[in-house]
Image (cartoon, rainbow, N blue to C red):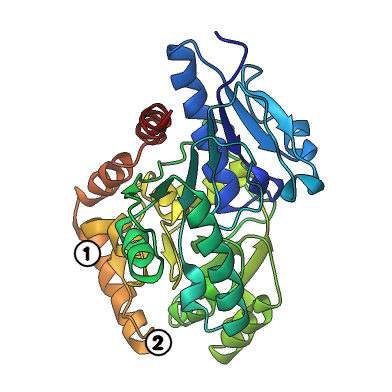
Amino acid sequence: MATTPSIIIDCDKMKYANTGLFSFCYYLITELNKVAEKYDETIAVFAPDKVRQREHFPESVKFISSKTWNKYYLHLPSHYKVWHSTFQLGKYWPKNDIPKILTIHDLNFLYHGDDKEYDYSLSILRKNVKRADKIITISEFSKNDILRYLNVEDKKVEVIYNGCNYFHGELVAPAEQHRAFLFSVGTILPKKNFHVLPCLLKDNDLDLIIAGNTSDYCNVIMREAKKWNVENRVKIVGPISEGMKHWYLKNCYAFVYPSIAEGFGLPVVEAMNYGVPVFLSRHTSLPEVGGETAIYFNREFDPEMMQFEFLRGINNYNSDSKVKEKIKERAGMFSWSTAAKQYWDIYKEIT
């Protein structure tokens, strides 16, 4: 294998574990390295030292340590021919006159109702789009948002879907044994819309388990749980390991994901891989990912309608002996191997 890499990939966001951007970088780099080996080439990762210390990648992946001052000045050795920024608001851009690729995951700030965030994010994103020679996004929904709200000039926007995150490690059961439970996972912020879920526990014995990095929004979820008198059955367990996350995904009664701001929705595909019933919001990219195998809540999240939709969906799932395999087949449509090959083709196309 060539020891001098020509492609460098900005993985700065891997410093935040238990996030979708961490998973995106980890699985994409892992598969890209396999493609590079096939062509006797090497790729490099640009990230903070603590990412290297976690030893996520094979030794053949070169590691370039990022420094805070690189946000203001970054000049790469001449052997680098492609820079790939994996986050739309990334602040690291080399001064070199080399082709630059930008992955835009979503324009979620459009849907938050926060004017300050809207202005800040839009300003940075416009600069990054101007810097980039090629723009990639992860769903047709995000592509439509990009074309509608950003001036991409004559740059073509291509869609490369994320893959399904297959877990090959040991499943880790939680110390606390739960009764039958609904499960959801993600950074616990208002855009995930988790507070609409406690109503689903009415008139049954289910628990609701929500995992992910926490915030003050947890209080909103628990207030809603108290309103439905189910606060003792709503468990916000915080960040968990991959092994435990996949235990929950495999063993849940149903996976529930009412997010109102998604560029793709990696946890959805992970859940579908286990063939469990998947209940989603109708907002942003989720119908594109879930397809006909998922079950959808009404757009307004009316509690009584959600309760009806949930019961009907569970009954339909239990009455169809083939539905579990159909759900798994849907998950199999999304492949990191395929995504890596598509990115590799673009790297070679622009060099």
Give 23 or 258, whichever is nearer the viewer.
Answer: 23
Residue 38, which numbered label?
A: none
Residue marked by disc 2: 303
| Residue 137 visible to an observer of this rendering | yes
Tell me if 351 is positioned left or right of 77 in this view.
Answer: left
Q: Marks 1/2: CA distance?
A: 20 Å
| Residue 179 visible to an observer of this rendering | no
Tell which tag, 1 or 2, sits nearer the viewer: 2
Give 280 or 108, whichever is nearer the viewer.
Answer: 108
Q: Label 2 amino acid?
A: Pro
Q: Earlier in the sequence, mark 1 or mark 2?
A: 2
Q: Residue 167: x, y in percent? A: 51, 36
Residue 316, which numbered label?
A: 1
The image shows residue 176, relative to residue 314, as above or below, that is above
What is the quadrant of the C terminus in the image? Answer: top left
Residue at 52 percent across and 51 percent down: it is 131
Please identify the residue farthest to the bottom as the structure is shown.
227
> Dot 2: few (<14), some (14–19), or many (≥20) neighbours within 10 Å?
some
The image shows residue 222, relative to residue 260, as above or below, that is below
Asked which quadrant contains residue 282, the reply is: bottom left
Q: Secondary structure at mark 1?
A: helix
Residue at 57 percent across and 69 percent down: it is 123
Q: Residue 221: x, y in percent? A: 60, 80
> Dot 1: few (<14), some (14–19), or many (≥20) neighbours within 10 Å?
some
Asked which quadrant contains residue 79, the reply is: top right
The image shows residue 342, relative to residue 302, as above or below, that is above
Q: Residue 186: x, y in percent? A: 56, 60
